[in-house]
Image: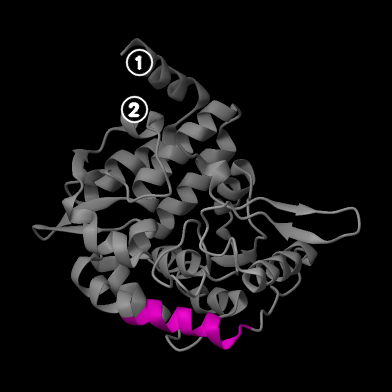
Amino acid sequence: MFEEAQLYSPVTTGDGGEVTVHLHDGHPGANDADYRRRRNEIAAAALAWHPGQPAPAIAYDESEEEVWRTVCRELAPLHERFAVSEFRTALSEVALPANRIPRLDDVTGRLASLGGWRYVPAAGLVDLRTFYGSLAERTFHSTQYVRHPAMPLYTPEPDIVHEVIGHGHLLATPTFGELHRRAGVAARRLQHEESLRFLSRVFWFTLEFGVVVEAGDLRAYGAGILSSYGELGEFRAMQMRPLDLLEMGTAQYDITRYQPVLYCAESVAEIETVIGAFFDTCTDESIEELRREHAVA
């Protein structure tokens, strides 16, 4: 099973300053020397960035732009059919270009009047405390690399498609953007690493892979589903369970396959009541009590 610390391919810097992204053997680009070189270049640009500077302006090549165009074209009808209404509204309000990959500063500019979120570059892995804690300040750490062109509708790790198409539109919504922020405030309140991991799993099964009944229809609100062509077409066939903080906070999951179990809210109001309240009130002590219940069970 995989946890948040394994969501990204590890990035290292050698003694000579060379930056290397370590793709696992099953990655679509593992045996593509040009793709690996490109990943190293984009990771190096992120590592060279300092707060207060503009985000690196990546000059994407035609194959990378074509991946973006393909994903936008294929996701559009699925969003109309399966995305929660706030997300569909955000699609038109944010108005991302479908013909080119936007720069992170462009995304920040488009979100300025829609909650004021700011995108900053990430080379790859961002530790849990930094990633979740920054959400409290409406700051989102985003990768800038693009999935391998041989598989434009699949990625084994979050790329700019996931970060911007998935999370970017959620951040622009009143309900889910605010839930991201409240998760960040909660993360800063927690001192114990086990508590932070519990919170991250609740986040995973909601803001990454959450589904909800809206107007009598099952729709997705999780960024992981909404940025995945395959998962968005298949999620309705998965096992649905009611929201359960204990189950979500202790469940294991595998990021290399579609999520077989999803937690379904009966309404957006229930997400606010259950998940919002958890983010607003959770403490190390309250989470430890939940974890003790899990151990006893």
Element at badge 2? helix
- At horizontal 53% and vertical 34% (from top left) the residue drawn is 196
Up-down: is 173 above or below 74? above
Farthest residue in the right direction? 16
Report the residue marked by disc 1.
293
Q: Position of residue 26 (x, y in %)?
A: 51, 53
Label located before the other in sequence (2 or 1) = 2
Q: Position of residue 157 (x, y in %)?
A: 50, 56
Query: Which amino acid does the dot numbered 1 rest on?
Result: Glu
- At horizontal 35% and vertical 73% (from top left) the residue drawn is 90
Farthest residue in the top direction? 296
Point out which mark residue 134 bears. Answer: none
Report the residue marked by disc 2.
246
Q: Magenta includes 72? A: yes
Query: Which amino acid does the dot numbered 2 rest on?
Result: Leu
Q: Position of residue 60 (x, y in %)?
A: 61, 83
Mark 2 surroundings: few (<14), some (14-19) or many (≥20) residues within 10 A:
some
Residue closer to the observer: 260 or 4: 260
Numbered marks: total: 2
Measured in 3D between alpha carbons, the distance from the residue under mark 2 to the one under mark 1, in whole angstroms, is 8 Å
Say whether residue 292 is left or right of residue 29: left
Q: Position of residue 251 (x, y in %)?
A: 37, 32
Task: Tell me which segment is drawn in magenta.
Answer: 60-73
Say whether residue 93 is left or right of residue 110: left
Up-down: is 190 above or below 24? above
Farthest residue in the front direction? 31
* Displayed quadrant of residue 280: top left
The answer to whether mark 2 and mark 1 are in CB contact below 8 A is yes
Q: Magenta includes 176? A: no
